[in-house]
Image (spheres, rainbow, N blue to C red):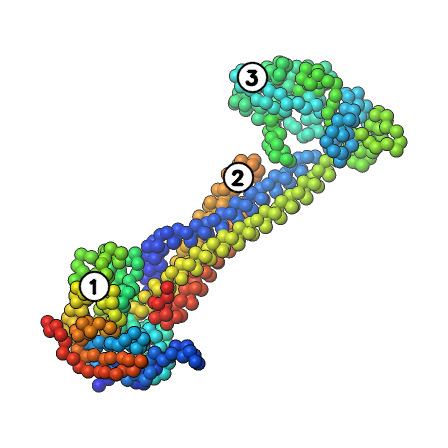
Amino acid sequence: MTAPIELIGITRTYGEGEAMVRALDGVDLRIEAGEFVAIMGPSGSGKSTAMNIIGCLDRPSAGQYLFNGVEVARLDQDQRALLRRHYLGFVFQGFNLLARTTALENVELPLIYKGMAKAERIALARDALHKVGLDGREDHTPAQLSGGQQQRVAIARALVSQPMVMLADEPTGNLDTKRSVEIMELMQRLNREEGLTIVMVTHEEDMAAYASRLVVFTDGRVVRDEKVEARHAL
Amino acid sequence: MLFETVRLALTAIIRNALRSFLTVLGVVIGVAAVIAMVTVGQGSSEQVAANVEALGTDVLILRPGARMMGPGARDNAPAFKLADVEALEGLGALSAVAPVVSTSETAVFGNANRTTTVTGTTSAWLEIGGWEIARGRAFTATEDKSGANVCIIGETVRTTLFGATDPTGETIRVKAVSCQVIGLLTAKGAGSFGQDQDDIVVMPVRTVQRRLVGAQDVASISLQVAPGASTDRAIADVQTLMRERRRIAIGEDDNFSVTDMKEIASMLNSVNTVLTGLLSSVAAVSLLVGGIGIMNIMLVSVTERTREIGIRLAVGAQARQVLTQFLVEAVVLSVLGGVLGIVTGLALAAVAAQIMAIPFAPSLGVVAMAFGFSALVGVIFGYFPARAAARLDPIDALRHQ
């Protein structure tokens, strides 16, 4: 059976010649449907680079990346956009919501690009906001929401298009412990109840503990990869 | 999908009201400045052309003092007398001769008064200047010679002293002279140098000499070349006669001058050419400055929005969808600014034309050029930086600071 994500010998370099930096150096990684994978590692270990390549936000310098069995390197810019549109959802450390735009409209955005009718978009966006516990905040702009609430909006936006995989890059990096725990519990619930495959980059062990599998990067390589017992069983 | 993209663009415009306002303002200023400038320029150009026509190219002006002499030099030359006028009337090359004595006096009627130019002359002056009597009559031959207490007033003086009522038959007071208004001149508007030609009271020359100026001098003499006679011939005849009358020895310079209005006309025309050229360059510079303003706002806006482009790409927008949105935004803002700029520019030009008393002369070519240039700059600088951003890998666009 093909896995949603399969990296084979992925290398990503920046710069040229003497100044060349190897952010990823021959990474092999296979992620199965329904997994909740936490990627850890020190700064500069290549964990975020790996995440960006998985999300088709960045392209590898060498190696093969199969998404659902499809060789991503063969896709052009527009096809990669379609892949993101239909199969991937992103949550970033800095939230990356559109400013001066309501929570509902932010969540609607991926559906607009899917070509969905307005009424259907609103219904789905409301539903997604309900799932992340933001009922009643639909008309708030990011500036009117707390950091935790903004990250929930971002999660709702990642969920709303019913992606195959949700990618989260340091989703709790800008939040205090209490909000972080809420976000992690939310993600764990989505993984367990909805069967959503989640790949999360974090440098906090407390957050990684919510995942079912831990992958550790050092110097652009995978140095540890093991199934773990998720800490907070619901 | 296109509809949705257009809606996204309009939403973005409204959401970023300040940025949109500044962009539109840039276009408005560029377009309005050029249109106002060029329209005023063309209006004054038309005005000059009309003035040149009105000057009458068969008119000569005779003044005491040689031409091109410094101030004061003219004072040493003896003034003309009415006898000179009579002598000139004998020349066959001239069809009309009019003495001119001007002074500035206050005309009073009832409670109203106005300080105006009082010109003492004869009815020949009306003929030479192409003046028409709107109401009443011109001076009779007797009045021309006698110095009767009568006057003909210009439209501006009539408006100030009489309002809308008929002035003929009324008596006005000019300095210490009471004179009866016998006629009203047809309005001429602004003169070649912007002066109000209708701000005038015309009286018989002797009346002005005796009662207002208190001297027998004639400041200048207007001459009209007879139909069919050559201007050069007329000038030569006048010079010969005046040298004789003023007893100028052979070899001595003239102590008077004859100005041909044709020369003034050609001078005005060349001044006008320079003026038009100047206005065009100023307009070109404003267009350029306006263009740079638009460019700046668009560039700053796109830099600021590169992260937004990254977000849109990350959630699955294709580059061309993002581009269409930015293009629509740029077009809407540029067109909106262009239209407002045209309206503002034309309004400014109309007000300026009113104040400067010149014709309002809008030109489709200039409007189209100013609008086209600004819109083009707006669209190009809204579109191309956005295109560069949309071609980035989404992660680079997202990391953009």
- The answer for which chain carries disc 3 is B
Badge 1 local density, few (<14 within 10 Å), some, or many (20+)? few
Report helix, strand or loop for mark 3.
Answer: strand
Q: Quadrant of the N terminus of chain A?
A: bottom left
Chain that bears disc 1: A
Helix, strand or loop at mark 1: loop
**Residue B2: x, y in percent?**
35, 63
Q: What chain does mark 2 sit on?
A: B
- Image coordinates of residue A133 in percent, x first then y, are 16, 62
Q: Amino acid at mark 1?
A: Asp
Q: Are marks 1 and 3 on the same chain?
A: no
* Discs 2, 3: same chain: yes
Q: Residue at x 34, y 70 (%)?
A: B395
- Residue B90: image location, x then y, percent: 82, 25
Residue position marked by numbered label 3 in the rendering: B109
According to the picture, the residue beneath numbered tag 2 turns out to be: B352
Q: Which mark is residue B252?
A: none
